[in-house]
Structures are given as C-alpha cells and as structure tokens.
Image (tube, helix red, strand yellow):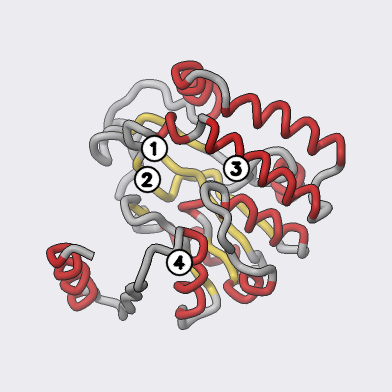
Amino acid sequence: MPAALAERIAELAATSPIPVDVLELDRNLGLGPALDVGLAACRHDVVARMDADDISLPHRFAVQMPLVEAGADLVGSGLLEFGEGADDVVGRRIPPTDPDVIRARSRFADPFNHPTVVYRRELVQAVGGYGDFALMEDYLLWAKMIAAGARVANVAEPLVLYRVGAGAYRRRGGLAQLRTEWGLQRRLRRLGFTTRTQWARNVAVRGGYRLVPEGVRRLAYRRFVAPYGERGRASLPPR
C-alpha cells in the first residue's frame, strides 16, 4: 500500500467518532476472500456492506435496522448512481420490496443492490461466506442465503449514492463477464437454486447480454434498469 494512502487511512481511523479496525492483507486475495477476512474480524453480528467510494445517506441505518430487528436476515435498499460528483445523479435503481418477489427474481437476476445491504453475519458465514468468485460474489452469496431460508427485505427508498465510472458499462460485458456468467449459472444449478428451464433461460438471456456491444448495453441499462429522468440537484435526497 502506498505510504500516503496508508497515512490517510490511519488518520481517518484515528479521528473516527466510532471505533475502526483497519485490516491490511499481505497480498491481494480478491474481493470475496477479503470480505470474508473482514467478516471474521467483525465485532457484531449485523454487518453493513458498502463500497469505499460510495456514500451512505445519514438515515440509512435508521431505515434498515428496524427491519433486521423485526427478523430479516438480509436487507437492501434503492440507490442513486452518480458520476462526477454526488450531485451528478445519472441513474436510480429500485429493487423489488415484496419478499416473495425478491425470492422469485433471485432465480433470474440479482434482487439486491449490493452496496446497500445489511445482513446477519452468522447466516453469511453459515452458508460459506463470499468465497472466491470474482465479479459476481455478491449475487452468489444472496442465492446461497435465500436457498438456506434467509428472511429477505428491500426498501425502495434510495439510501446509498453509488459511484459509476467511465468503465462501468464496459465491465458488464465481454468474454470475461461471459465466462463468469456461465460459471455463476453452473453454481446456481448445482445448488438446486434454479430449475433446468431457468438455467437455460439465464444462459441464453444473461449470457447473450454480455456479448451485446457496449453502446447498446448502456442504452438498455439506462432505459430499463436505472432510469432517472432529468439530471440535477432537485431530485437528490437530503444528506
């Protein structure tokens, strides 16, 4: 780790109003294994997931924690995608909120926005944690949890601002993503999470999407997955 970055992280940890433990790995294990190391070091059973360059709105946990306290094992929320800065909102991703719909959708697509989830660490570790499955470790984990009987919930309200860089659409396609997609579908089928018909549909539809030209993927994503309308500050939630 560069010295300047290490110093900045140490400064943030030292000045944080809440206790912070910094775990530095000897080598790059990949995202999934690194998350498992972090989970093992957590002091509490309820864990919140967020990427380093995202922004949680101040009331995020005031909305999600009551659902966990009411019995949910895995709780997500909506999110707003932003570009150059937090006020440059370019997309809105609203997940399904009915538990039955969440479980049904999970056979065909990820029903959670991964940077928004709050979950029970005990159940995550009971199903084997994230494991080493680069690019789609979150989706695979949700599937394992749902297969194990996890109680699921989503909040439609965007509670996290999610940064999307210039390469976001490129990373969703290509041969590497196609191979990962095929691997994911094999895992879901082996788990008994999908039927043979669902597996075939996913291989064709989800696999085919990975081979669509980047410009078409961008257009489809903005039109059907994360439409936002007019960009600007007026619709941005208070922070």
The image shows residue 90 at horizontal and vertical percentages of 36, 29
Q: Given the image, on which type of amino acid does mark 3 rest?
A: Thr
The image shows residue 13 at horizontal and vertical percentages of 23, 74
Q: Is residue 167 left or right of residue 42?
A: left
Q: Are marks 4 and 3 in contact (CB under 8 Å)?
A: no
Relative vertical location of residue 181 with respect to residue 29 in this rendering, above or below: above
Quadrant showing the N terminus = bottom left
Q: Earlier in the sequence, mark 4 or mark 3?
A: 4
Q: Given the image, on which type of amino acid does mark 4 rest?
A: Ala
| Residue nearest the viewer, comparing 139 with 71 | 139
The residue lying furthest to the bottom in this view is: 43
Report, in whole angstroms, how far the alpha carbon at label 4 lies from the one at label 2. Answer: 23 Å
Report, in whole angstroms, how far the alpha carbon at label 1 lies from the one at label 2. Answer: 6 Å
Residue that badge 3 annotates: 180
Q: Could you tell me which secondary element the residue under label 3 belongs to?
A: helix
* Residue 52 placement: quadrant: bottom left
Q: Given the image, on which type of amino acid does mark 2 rest?
A: Leu
Residue that badge 2 annotates: 161
Q: Nearer the viewer, mark 4 or mark 1?
A: 4
Relative vertical location of residue 102 with respect to residue 130 in this rendering, above or below: above
Residue that badge 4 annotates: 34
Report, in whole angstroms, how far the alpha carbon at label 4 lies from the one at label 1. Answer: 25 Å
Report, in whole angstroms, how far the alpha carbon at label 4 lies from the one at label 3. Answer: 19 Å
